[in-house]
Image (tube, helix red, strand yellow):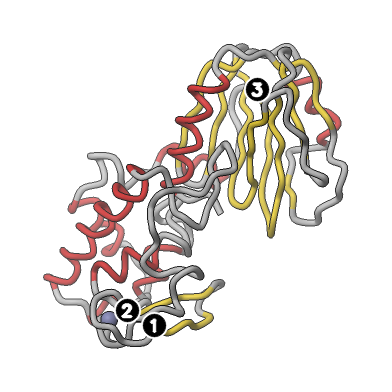
Amino acid sequence: MIEIPESFTISQQASETLKGKTIAHIIEPNSLHRFAFYNGDPAGYSGILVGRTIQTARGHGCFVDILMDEDTHLLIGDGTHICYHTSTEKAPKKYQLMIVFEDNSFLAFTVSMYGSIYAFKGEFDNPYYQGSLHKPCPLDERFDKVYFLSIIKNLKKDLSAKALLATEQRIPGLGNGVVQDILFNARIAPKRKISTLTEKEIDRLFHTLKSTLEEMTRQGGRDTEKDLYGILGNYRTILSKNTYHTPCPACGGRIIKEAYLGGSVYYCPHCQPA
Ligand SMILES: [Zn+2]
């Protein structure tokens, strides 16, 4: 899934690699996917995208926003994988969209569990997109301690640490993937209620939230997710599906895997006590 480190990494790569390329044609999905989301019929994307030239790309929240002339956007999010191929490379067998440039290089979009591929001109009235554009990102200076405390103050009920960070898009692009290492670094269990956290723990959570995401982004995304070229990121996840069979790197204890709030959580019961 695209989360903050991946949306920044992929959009930076897209800016470098795709800038100046003009879209020659669109190839419609060859495989139906119940949870691939489009705005309208993807057959209509040709009318929006063909002839447009890519100017830059921006990452915000879980979105990679590719900007073209005539205020045209190609927006991908969640579990959509965007992969760049040169003209000599083969297309994947199944895809949910392909975009071919005038030089015959192309982008292939594939959706695993669920994902979005939107094409539009001007504004796009989607609450997740608008939230990701306007709410401060933990990588920004605007996301400071005062802002973080205001998120906690505005909670309508006592939530767990995972719910605070990774649900309801309070912090766009912070999802079930990156939250594992943030909470491990803060030494806070995913199910700990916010009301039980000391001032010191809240301060630690704020700092690890920022520093963990900065480190993941600096290293080109997590090693569980692929970049624009289909290559896994360099950030070695501490707690993920890749690592939970190995002992806790801090204490050597056994890592717990549990289903919690729409996804697995991994934690060390010794380092992150309930
Ligand atoms: Zn431990």
Whether the residue under disc 2 has CB within 8 Å of ligand 1: yes
Amino acid under disc 2: Cys
- Residue density around tag 1, few if under 14, some if 14–19, many if 20 or more, within 10 Å: many
Q: Name which residue lies at 46% across and 62% down.
A: 177
Q: Is residue 206 above or below residue 23?
A: below
Instruction: Answer whether labels 2 and 3 touch (C-beta < 8 Å).
Output: no
Please name the residue shown 18% across and 53% down the image. 145
Q: Label for residue 248?
A: 2
Disc 1 from disc 3: Cα separation: 47 Å
Closest to the observer, 224 or 75: 224
Instruction: Please report contact status of discs 1 and 3: CB closer than 8 Å, yes or no.
Output: no
Quadrant in which the C terminus is drawn: bottom left
Work out whether residue 254 can be spotted: yes
Q: Where 266 sits versus 234, above or below?
A: below
Q: Kindly identify the amino acid type of the residue bearing the numbered disc 1.
A: Ile
Q: Nearer the viewer, mark 1 or mark 3?
A: 1
Work out whether mark 1 precedes mark 3 in sequence or the reverse, and give the earlier one. Answer: 3
Earlier along the polypeptide chain: callout 2 or callout 1?
Answer: 2
Q: Position of residue 246 (x, y in %)?
A: 40, 78
Q: Secondary structure at mark 1?
A: loop
